[in-house]
Image (tube, rainbow, N blue to C red):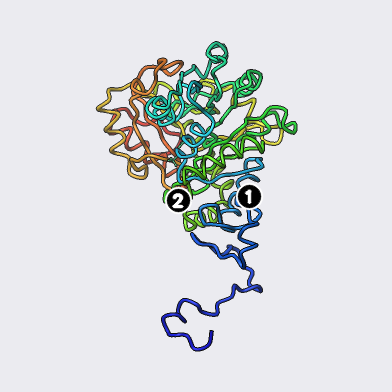
Amino acid sequence: MTNPHLSTHLIHHPYAAPTEFSAPQQPVHKASTVFFPDVATMRSRRWLDKSGYTYGLHGTPTSFTLEERLCALEGGQQCLLVPSGLAAISTISLALLSQGDEVLIPDNAYGPNKDFAQHELARYGIRYAFFNPMDVEDLRSKLSPATKLVWLEAPGSVTMEFPNLLAQVQLVRQHGALSALDNTWGAGLAFLPFDLLRDGGSVQVDISAHALTKYPSGGGDVLMGSIITRDHAVHMRLKLAHMRLGLGVGMNDVELVLRSLPSTALRYHAQDKTARQLVAALQRQNAVKQLLHPAFASSPGHAHWQQLCATPENPAGAAAGIFSVVFDAPQSQVDDFCNRLQLFKLGYSWGGHISLVMPYALDEMRDLGRGAVLPGCLVRLCIGLEDAADLERDVAQAYGHAFGHAWRGQGVH
Ligand SMILES: *Cc1c(COP(=O)(O)O)cnc(C)c1O
């Protein structure tokens, strides 16, 4: 059209995407509407197989790129992005369970996963049971013909018990149910969810759910989740439910995750190192009763962690920078300890650049008891990217004030 009105010109400008522009970050492709060149193309495009773009909810080049990179990170074939880690969990359960089915969930799973089964799945006539993550026989005894999905988490949220994931996955597979792993802690870096024995995939989970909110985002400012599979049929069941539920993610958030992804491994291992230094320091203290970090022998399932996460190339093993402390002190003193920390902020989540602390009332969270976690008040510490000596100094000052014991340092005052 020649000489359109200014208002039309502002809309139909002669912009064409640059072809000779190459830079470290990809451009961000945002869309609800996607244009088709003609009706025949529109009719022939299929959103299901990602062979063409049809509508923003089904993805843009930006979200397709993140999906491919997450598949590479976790060793999967297909990936769905959802608005949060919890949405990954709820989508998987909703997509794969029907009335009369049963889902099994470890008692130490991420709390809202249990909550979703109790309050939402139950309304659809889907039954649930919690199992002891540290007793494979308990899981075996709870598998029934109705069991269609088994959730797994290694280690468990807050209490960090590391289960015999290999045995659990094999048992679920033998039973003919699907296994879904909440892989937020491992993040694709501590162990390989689709190749647990590192032999090319003889033992693998069916589905990996990941709260990208944590390590892949790394900034404490994005909520996102992913659902990764290797089996086309399982992926299709998830993908159709995902579409019908209308779940999409914003491309500005996808851009933030894409920007952080290249440093994920560096951050993961740096936070691991600092966390272990702090655990070692806390182990020397009088008011500390138990440290829950799977790389330490005091932590339930340490040997299972070692089997899965230590390799000949990395005998020290890999772990996320998060652990819990059971204090032998009254709740008021433990609360005071949390309040007195300065570098550690009081807040939920983890995997970001700022260290976080959170006290938990364990007895309200477990349906099958505390297991091997000793009695006492529990605090979870999530390690950020601060200097390790500064973090220890912060913990030492809060500890000294709150518990009235001198901090037993190793040259740190
Ligand atoms: C944070 C977290 C989730 C949920 O992620 P959101 O993005 O906060 O919804 C799920 N599982 C585990 C283990 C988590 O730590």
Identify whether 336 is placed above or below 390. Answer: above
Q: Which residue sits at x=66%, y=74%?
A: 20
Picture quarter with ligand 1: top left
Q: Does the residue labelled 1 lie within 8 Å of ligand 1?
A: no
Identify whether 402 is placed above or below 218. Answer: above
Looking at the picture, tell me which residue is in the foreground, 104 or 169: 104
State the image coordinates of residue 282 (x, y, percent, origin top left). 43, 30
Disc 1 designates what residue?
68
In terms of image quadrants, where is residue 137?
top right
Q: How crowded is mark 1: few (under 14 residues within 10 Å), some or many (20 or more)?
A: some
Looking at the picture, tell me which residue is in the foreground, 87 or 380: 87
Q: What residue type is labelled 1?
A: Glu
Mark 2 → mark 1, Cα distance in angstroms: 21 Å
State the image coordinates of residue 170 (x, y, percent, origin top left). 65, 21
Q: Which residue sits at x=54%, y=84%?
A: 1
Drawn side of residue 396 relative to residue 36, left or right:
left
State the image coordinates of residue 279 (x, y, percent, origin top left). 47, 31
Drawn side of residue 209 relative to residue 124, left or right:
right
Identify whether 75 is placed above or below 158. Answer: below
Q: Which of marks 2 and 1 is nearer the N terminus?
A: 1
* CB contact under 8 Å: marks 2 and 1: no
Q: How many labels does the image show?
A: 2
Q: What residue type is labelled 2?
A: Gly
Q: Which residue sits at x=46%, y=32%?
A: 323
Q: How crowded is mark 2: few (under 14 residues within 10 Å), some or many (20 or more)?
A: some
Identify the secondary structure beneath mark 1: helix
State the image coordinates of residue 15 (x, y, percent, origin top left). 55, 77
Residue 299 appears anywhere in the view: no
Drawn side of residue 103 relative to residue 175, left or right:
left
Disc 2 designates what residue?
219
Residue 244 appears anywhere in the view: yes
